[in-house]
Amino acid sequence: MRPIGDGVCSICGERMVSPYAFTGELGGPRCGLCRRLEPTFAKASAYGSYEGGLRELVHLLKYEQVRPAAPVLGRMLREAIADLEPSFRAAEILVVPVPLYSRKLRQRGFNQSEVIVRAALKHAVQDRLTLDTAVLERRRETQTQTGLTRHQRRENIRGAFVVAKPQKVKGREILLVDDVFTTGTTVSECARILRRAGASKVFVATVARTLKADANRADLDAEERAGMTMAAAG
């Protein structure tokens, strides 16, 4: 369970597979999507790739309610937050976990994002980060995002969240936290409504991130190996 490391988009954190690094306004490389569409968040950071042991650890907490996994994930989230801290300009940063819908919260018994960030903040070296779990609310239950196109994902999630405390948000820098950044649809929608409520900037920190570039590269490698096998057999 190692950190993602270098070679990622300076905005969304996706791995850069192109040999050409496109420089954005702030001087960092941007992936093609972030060059075409300005994200609703200023910068996203994740500790590691959502695979192997890290994926299993997230699932232990999320689906099997193994609470001892939370402090370990919290330390990882803290590293993702530390990566964002040089970009913070405000003296106090409001920390907001992505909320669960009420029925899902009752079923699970806790919001994994809240549990992880509480563990992360125990390792904070300063009181700059202030947690508020009531700023965002999830008012509508959504279907699983698995198998949906990018457009369908946006439509599925649109209108699901509301800012319950706009007075807390206006003019503030917000750190939005979640367990996993999969396609970015959920955090992008949350960032959008936080910005609309008056937040000056929204940053995103997650424990894990699905690296589509790695998945695409693995598919290409598999195809290449299959082609070599077929050529050898022929």
Image: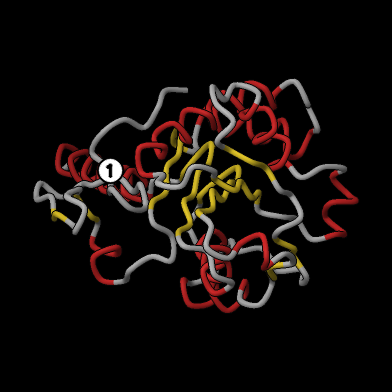
Most extreme residue toward the front is 91
Label 1, secondary structure: give it: loop
Instruction: Name the residue: 73% across, 36% down.
Output: 115
Instruction: Name the residue: 61% across, 46% down.
Output: 95
Between residues 134 and 218, which one lies in front from this camera angle?
A: 134
Between residues 40 and 106, which one lies in front from this camera angle?
A: 40
Which quarter of the figure is the C terminus placed in?
Answer: top left
Neighbor class of circle 1 (other Cα within 10 Å; few <14, some 14-19, many 20+) is many
Mark 1: amino acid: Val
Please tell me whether residue 10 is drawn above or below residue 83 in the rendered image: below
Between residues 188 and 145, which one lies in front from this camera angle?
A: 188
Left or right of 39: which side holds 206? right
What is the x, y in percent for residue 41? 43, 60
Please tell me whether residue 2 is drawn above or below residue 142 in the rendered image: above
Please tell me how many numbered marks the rendered image carries. Answer: 1
Q: Circle 1 sits on which residue?
A: 8
What is the x, y in percent for residue 80? 46, 34
Instruction: Name the residue: 51% across, 68% down.
Output: 195
Most extreme residue toward the left is 20
